[in-house]
Image (cartoon, rainbow, N blue to C red):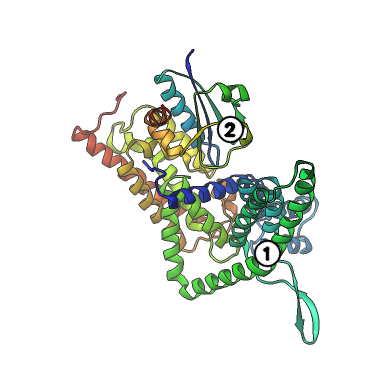
Amino acid sequence: MSKKLVALCACPMGLAHTFMAAQSLEKAAKELGYEVKVETQGADGIQNELTLKDIKEADIIIHAVAVTPLDPDRFEGYDVHEITLQQAIKNAKSIIQEIEESIK
Amino acid sequence: MEKQTSKGSKAWKEFNKHVMTGISYMIPVLIMGGLIGAFSQMIPYVFLKIDPSTSIVDAVNSGNFSGASLAFLKLSHIMESFGFTLFSFAIPMFAAFTANSIGGKTALAAGFIGGYVANKPIALLSLTEGKWAPKAPVASGFLGAILIAFMVGYFVKWLNKKIQLPHNWLAFKATFLIPLLAALFTMVAMVFVVTPFGGWVNTLIKSGLQAAGKAGQIVYSIVLAAATAFDLGGPVNKAAGFVALGFTTEKILPITARCIAIVTPSFGLGLSTLIDRKLVRRRVYDKQFYEAGKTAIFLAFMGISEGSIPFALERPAFVIPLYVVGSVFGALVAVVLGAVQWFPESAIWAWPLVSKLGIYILGLIVGAVFIAVINVLYRNKLINEGKLVVDGDE
């Protein structure tokens, strides 16, 4: 059973930062051996939406957001790690490792 | 990296997130209203070459237009009214979704009406010449919207937490009690606290800036341009936009410097990818930057600054100060020589709304060329010194 990481990215304009963060998290998570799914809430609406099943199965849930995401009730009761978009874009890998440390 | 160690920074982060959420829902309204509004101005003042000091209604009444041009004038009048009606919903939309971000659906409704009243204050009865008549106070505007959004957002959140009723009473709580309390709270807060305070602050700022005159305007332009350019659509930019939007919608200070600073970095850095081979006879960027450069220029015409991000990430220590200085420089040229833009949008379709558009464009060109030439020369110097290697040299 592989480890699973799900993330949600959202920025005010939904043009650039959202997708840069998503890309960077996806790449870092894959390098660290995760099965990964990243939802983006950009100007084109919700893409790659995380289902309740995704969230339930995930070992790590990350929100890389600068705004309050849509449909936040899905995550109720789960441990959500909220980071900034800048952290996701620049240091995705070390942030994921930091989270791994904290939940060990 | 930032860490959430201190309580202060966490509260600031929360605040920022709610404000950004509100802004993100306000932006489509600004774009829609702005587009329709801008087209409505282009028909008479650009295509029909009517003098900008003549209103559309006066132009129709002048009798100089008939047939197709008269029909177009009537259409532009409809578009003007529609566009600016849409536009007036920007602030209510902002307040609604900021409050929603804090307190959920009930707060959304209360925030919306709060934002609307911030724009159009409730008239109070006042005694003039022995007769009571309704009189509207000075609007609290953007400042009022942000205050009421936070007040009502946290109020609703607090009510939901504090009022604990048995389960069968849930409907009563959700459909009667909390909406009633939220609406009453919004009314009282808007009439007796937010409007007087916000109106007072707005009047104060307005008279202060008018007293400072030209010098005040120039200092404002420098700070606004620098903050706007700094992080290319990031939080500093948005915070600056927030303040500037308040000033421009209250007609206190125009937003010219910001409009120029939004797009100057992208025009400049994009331009640098076009001129490097002519200027120093070699490529100074890796291959993928030439695509990024064209995208940046295209996005700049759309009034979007994010196209410059790849350039800023690649060599931030030099590029960020460079485009900040370039943007301030360009903004100053435009502002000092008298270009004025009240409309908070820098995309090309808003250009017809600028007074002295030639000077505005001159400011853009000065800023962009400054950034492009210096960055190309600097990178060329680094390459010559062996400190920078670019791939795919022809």
B218 and B237: which one is in front? B237
Crowd rating for badge 2 (residues with CA inside 10 Å; few <14, some 14–19, many 20+): few
> Residue B141 at what x, y percent from top left?
62, 62
Choose top left, top right, bottom left or bottom right for residue B62: bottom right
Circle 1 SS class: helix
Question: Which label was assigned to residue B190?
Answer: 1
Left or right of residue B59, residue A32 in this image: left
Left or right of residue B348, residue B285 in this image: left
Query: Are the residues flagged by discs 2 and 1 from a single subunit?
Result: no
B124 and B314: which one is in front? B124
| Residue hosting label 2 | A77
Judged from this view, the residue extending furthest toward the front is: B166
Quadrant assignment for the C terminus of chain B: top left
- Residue occupying image coordinates x 59% and y 57%: B146
Amino acid type at circle 1 is: Met
Q: From where the camera sits, is residue B48 visible?
A: no
- Residue occupying image coordinates x 61% and y 46%: B101
Quadrant assignment for the N terminus of chain B: top left
Circle 2 SS class: loop
Question: Which label was assigned to residue A79?
Answer: none
Left or right of residue B145, residue B3 in this image: left
- Measured in 3D between alpha carbons, the distance from the residue under mark 2 to the one under mark 1, in whole angstroms, is 36 Å
Query: Label 2 marks which chain's residue?
Result: A
Query: Label 1 marks which chain's residue?
Result: B
Amino acid type at circle 2 is: Gly
Judged from this view, the residue extending furthest toward the top is: A1
Left or right of residue A45, residue A21 in this image: left
